[in-house]
Amino acid sequence: MAGNTFGKLFKLTTFGESHGEALGGIVDGCPPGIEIDFQAIHAEMQRRKPGQSSIVTQRQEADEVQFLSGIFEGKTTGTPIGFLIPNTNQKSDDYSHIKETYRPSHADYVYEQKYGIRDYRGGGRSSARETASRVVGGAIAKQIIPNIKINAFVSSVGEIFIDKPYQDLDFSKTESNAVRCPDSATAKKMEAYIKEIKKEGDSVGGTITCVIQNVPIGLGEPVFDKLHAELGKAMLSINAVKGFEFGSGFCGAKMKGSEHNDLYNADGTTKSNLSGGIQGGISNGMDIYFRVAFKPVATLLQKQDVLTTKGEIIEQQGKGRHDPCVVPRAVPIVEAMAALVLADYFLLK
């Protein structure tokens, strides 16, 4: 299986399955002499881990990271940083009923068709648990991009949206509720709706908005390696992501050029920022902001028609521990992937 490495200079390779012995990764290209903040890495893992509230999967994993190489006396040595995240709370029997079936909107069928074999326990390599390794890599990446601030938050769940621009939000409130929405009134509505969906054995999607501030001018290359193109690839590589837009996004397609152009100030900044901090594929020093759309989790605790390995359609009900809405736990994953992109371009520059 190819495609397990992300990045050009700052590279993250991940390995492991949802119900294997451990997940893990290798960070290659990290400069030497960086003093690693292990507590910051732990905090990021706590934000992503399962079982953290009543509106997420109740799988209980400590998600403690064991570093194996590349760090000596608390500082990076410039050699590959190897790490492990042990799996400690697998319940593989929860998936025995899908050994001979393919679940709707999962990777089960295409995996088996492509590779001739699949790990049906929690989806194996296609499980969103793989993203734990990304959060470790992103937490390290955040420590080599000086002064850059990355803040992601849940901006919608189903039809419930924050009706304020990000400039009017206090990002320090994002972690104050289980939904990770910085607007408390909207967060309460979102949480109540997710709980309602959970009782129905159903799931719901949503969006995450990410704002990146203090980005220096000049990150990104103007043709195939545009900064926003790499951010798009990074976000679309996350499980359950169905859409990515930055700056004015799809709303910009409805506007006139006279409405959309970002007119300059004398100091090179712009009066508006519909460009989303990127022009010609290169950062312009303004805030970079984008939105990522997540589909509803495909495993439902309801009966659905499924395809069997014998080509029959039968009725089957999902089992196990699953998120009724994945977006609250995906916030640190979005930040991690953004950090990996920025670290790579920072080193390239």
Image (cartoon, helix red, strand yellow):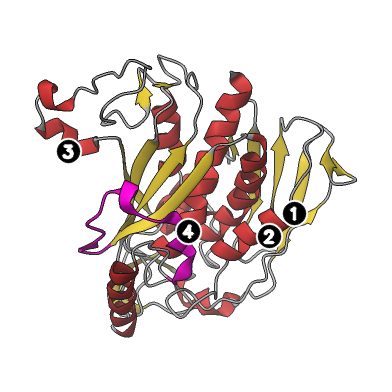
Near mark 1 (Cα within 10 A), the count class, few <14, some 14-19 or many ≥20, is some
Task: Tell me how far mark 1 sits from mark 3, CA to CA.
Answer: 41 Å
Q: Nearer the viewer, mark 2 or mark 4?
A: 4
Dot 4 falls on a residue whose secondary structure is helix
Query: Which disc, if any, is residue 38?
Result: 1
Q: Closer to the N terminus: mark 1 or mark 3?
A: 1
Is residue 161 rendered to the left or right of residue 344? Answer: left
User: Which residue is located at x 22 percent, y 57 percent?
Assistant: 163
Asked whether 88 falls inside the magenta stretch, the response is no
Report the magenta residues as a range: 157-178
- Residue 63 at what x, y percent from top left? 67, 65
Please name the amino acid that badge 4 sits on: Ser
Task: Tell me how far mark 3 sits from mark 4, CA to CA.
Answer: 28 Å
Cβ–Cβ under 8 Å for marks 2 and 1: yes
The answer to whether 141 is drawn above or below residue 98 in the figure is: above
- Residue 333 at what x, y percent from top left? 51, 52
Residue 71 makes an appearance in the image: yes
